[in-house]
Image: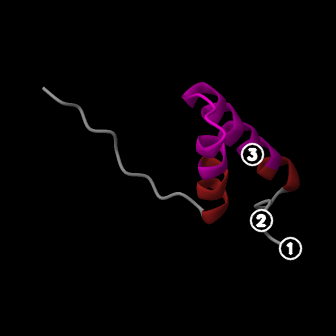
Amino acid sequence: MTTLAPVVAVSPLCQHLINEIDVRRFGREIQRNYIRDAGWFAAFLGRSPNMR
Protein backbone atom coordinates (compact mmCIF):
# COMPACT_ATOMS: atom_id res chain seq x y z
CA MET A 1 0.00 0.00 0.00
CA THR A 2 1.30 3.44 -0.93
CA THR A 3 0.64 6.47 1.27
CA LEU A 4 0.48 9.79 -0.52
CA ALA A 5 1.45 13.04 1.15
CA PRO A 6 -1.14 15.84 1.03
CA VAL A 7 -0.58 18.57 -1.53
CA VAL A 8 0.18 21.90 0.14
CA ALA A 9 0.33 25.30 -1.55
CA VAL A 10 3.82 26.76 -1.35
CA SER A 11 4.57 30.46 -1.60
CA PRO A 12 7.00 31.63 -4.30
CA LEU A 13 9.52 32.52 -1.58
CA CYS A 14 9.38 29.02 -0.06
CA GLN A 15 9.60 27.43 -3.51
CA HIS A 16 12.67 29.54 -4.31
CA LEU A 17 14.25 28.50 -1.00
CA ILE A 18 13.49 24.82 -1.70
CA ASN A 19 14.99 25.10 -5.21
CA GLU A 20 18.17 26.71 -3.86
CA ILE A 21 18.51 24.00 -1.20
CA ASP A 22 18.06 21.28 -3.86
CA VAL A 23 20.70 22.88 -6.12
CA ARG A 24 23.15 22.86 -3.21
CA ARG A 25 22.24 19.20 -2.49
CA PHE A 26 21.29 19.81 1.15
CA GLY A 27 19.37 17.02 2.85
CA ARG A 28 15.64 16.98 3.61
CA GLU A 29 16.25 17.71 7.30
CA ILE A 30 18.14 20.89 6.43
CA GLN A 31 15.34 21.85 4.02
CA ARG A 32 12.78 21.32 6.81
CA ASN A 33 14.87 23.43 9.20
CA TYR A 34 15.33 26.29 6.72
CA ILE A 35 11.59 26.41 5.97
CA ARG A 36 10.78 26.27 9.71
CA ASP A 37 13.23 29.09 10.46
CA ALA A 38 11.83 31.21 7.61
CA GLY A 39 8.39 30.76 9.21
CA TRP A 40 9.74 31.84 12.59
CA PHE A 41 11.36 34.87 10.96
CA ALA A 42 8.08 35.79 9.27
CA ALA A 43 6.29 35.49 12.62
CA PHE A 44 8.92 37.73 14.21
CA LEU A 45 8.47 40.34 11.47
CA GLY A 46 4.70 40.02 11.57
CA ARG A 47 4.64 39.64 7.78
CA SER A 48 6.10 37.56 4.98
CA PRO A 49 9.84 38.23 4.43
CA ASN A 50 9.24 38.67 0.67
CA MET A 51 7.06 41.78 1.17
CA ARG A 52 8.80 45.08 0.56
Where residue 41 appears, x then y in whole percent? Answer: 82, 46
**Above or below 46: residue 21:** above
Badge count:
3
What crowding class fits label 2: few (fewer than 14 Cα within 10 Å), some (14-19), or many (20 or more)? few
The residue stretch that appears in magenta: 19-41
Q: State left or right for residue 32 relative to residue 39.
A: left
Residue found at x 86% / y 47%: 44
| Residue kind at label 2, given as amino acid type | Asn
Q: Do the residues under discs 3 and 2 have CB atoms within 8 angstroms?
A: no
Q: Secondary structure at mark 1?
A: loop
Residue found at x 59% / y 28%: 27
Return the disc, 3 or 2, that comes first in the chain's sequence: 3
Question: Is 40 within the magenta?
Answer: yes
Which of 46 and 37 lies nearest the eye of the viewer? 37
What crowding class fits label 1: few (fewer than 14 Cα within 10 Å), some (14-19), or many (20 or more)? few
Residue 40: quadrant of the picture = top right
| Residue kind at label 1, given as amino acid type | Arg
Where residue 35 appears, x then y in whole percent? Answer: 66, 42
Q: Secondary structure at mark 3?
A: helix
Q: CA distance from mark 1 to mark 3?
A: 16 Å
